Amino acid sequence: MSNNITFHVENFIRNKVVKRTESLLKDDLEFYHDKLQKEVEGKKVLVIGGAGTIGSSYVKAILKYSPSKVIVVDTNENGLTELVRDCRSTTVLKMPVEFRTYPINFGDTVFRKLFVSEAPFNIVANFAAHKHVRSEKDIFSIEAMIENNVIKAKKLLDLLVIYPPAHFFCVSTDKAANPVNIMGASKKLMEEVILAYSDLIPITTARFANVAFSNGSLLAGFMERLAKQQPLSCPSDVKRYFVSPQESGEICLIASLLGSSGDILFPKLNDLMKFSDIARLLLNELNMDMQVCETEEVARQQAFLFSNGKQPAYPIYLFPSDTSGEKLYEEFYTLDEHLDMKTFKNLGVIKNAHRRKRSELDNIIQRLEENFIGNTPKESLVKLLQSFMPTFQHIETGYNLDQKM
C-alpha cells in the first residue's frame, strides 16, 4: 500500500459498508438514555472476552455511563493491553478508578477465584466464544468450540446462580437461526442453555450481523494482505449484513440492560453486501484497480509483480463458496419465532425462543462430553447435534477455510 495514502477504516465502514453517517442505535440510545444511565452508573461490571472487537466495543459503550468498577477478562493479553491504552487515550469515556484487566480463561480455576473474590457484579457480559465457521475443521477443533461456547457457558451460569447479577448477557450469532454449520449449532445450543436459566437470573442475548473489519474477519484480513502486498481472496457469492464495531457494542449494551429475561435481540437491517463488492470499493478507495485472478497461484504471482512495480492492478482471487458450513445469506430469526418489532426503533426482539429444561440440557452436555472421550468422527457428532436440534441442516463439502488463501 502506498505510504502517501491516508486511509481511515472507520470512515470507510461508515460511508461504503454500513452506509450510515450516524449509528444505527442513535435513536434508541437517546430514547433510553436515562434508563441506561440508571442501570450502569455506580455499578460493578464484569466483561468476559472483552479484548475482541465486540467485547471491547461493549466496554467502550458501557464506560460512557459511569460504572464504578469494570473488570475485563480475556485470553488475549495483547488485546487487553491495547484495550487499556485505547480507553485511557480517549476523551469521551468515563474511566472508573477501578478498571482492571486479566489475561485469564473464564473456564479456569483462577477465574472462579477472581469471580468469587469480586462478586456480586451488577452486570456480567460474556463475549468469549469461538465465532468462526473454520472452527469445525475436525473433531479437535469442534471439541474446543463446543467446550468454549456451550460447556463453559453452563459452568458460568451455575456460578452466576450462586452470585446473581442484575443483568447477564451472552452474545450469540445470526448463524444460530437455522444453523448449517457446527459453530452456528453450538451457539444455538448455547442460547438454549442460557435461556434455561432465565427464570433464575435476568438473561438476554443478541444475534449478530457481521462486524465490519472485526478482529480475524475477512475484511480485517484484506488490510493485512494489503499491508504485506499479498493478494486478496474472497468468495464471489456470499452476502452478509454489516454493522460497525461501535454499533456492535451498542447493540449488546441495549440488549444486556433493556431486554427482558429470555429475550434475543437482533439489528433491523435491509442491505446485504457481497465481500467481493467491498473488496472492489476498498481498492477504489485506495486508488487501485482490481485484477480478478482465476486461481490462487495466479493471484500470488500477480501480487509478486505488483510489489515489484510490474503490475498496475491489485490481484484478487474470487471463487464460488465451497467450504463446509458456509451459508450464502444471513437470517436473524426463524418463522416460528415471535417478534417484537416495536419496543426499539432499530432492534427487533425474539420473545418466544425455545427453552429446554435444565435437566434435559444436563443430559445433552453429558452426551457431548462422552462423545469427546474418544476421537469421535465429525459425522457422528453432526448426527448427535441434529438429534438435539432437528433444524440443524449441516452443509458438508469436504473443504474448510484453512484450505483457502
Image: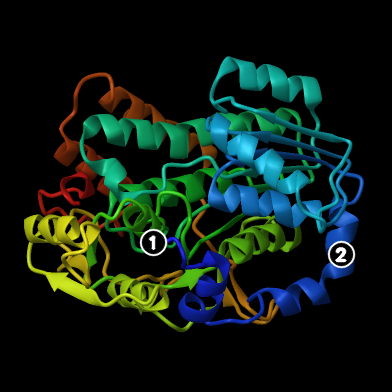
Nearest to the observer: residue 88 or residue 270: 88
Q: Is residue 19 left or right of 331 when viewed as pictured?
A: right
Nearest to the observer: residue 162 or residue 387: 162
Disc 2 marks a residue whose amino acid type is: Lys
Image point (22%, 63%), residue name: 309
Q: Is residue 167 visible?
A: no
Please rate how many residues cluster around mark 1, counting C-alpha atoms within 10 Å: few if below 14, some from 14 to 19, many from 20: many
**SS class, disc 2:** helix
Disc 1 marks a residue whose amino acid type is: Leu
Q: Is residue 91 left or right of 280 when viewed as pictured?
A: right
The label shown at residue 219 is 1
What x and y, as percent, mark residue 285?
42, 76
What x and y, as percent, mark residue 188?
42, 52
Q: Is residue 370 visible?
A: yes
Which residue position holds label 2?
35
Image point (82%, 77%), residue name: 31
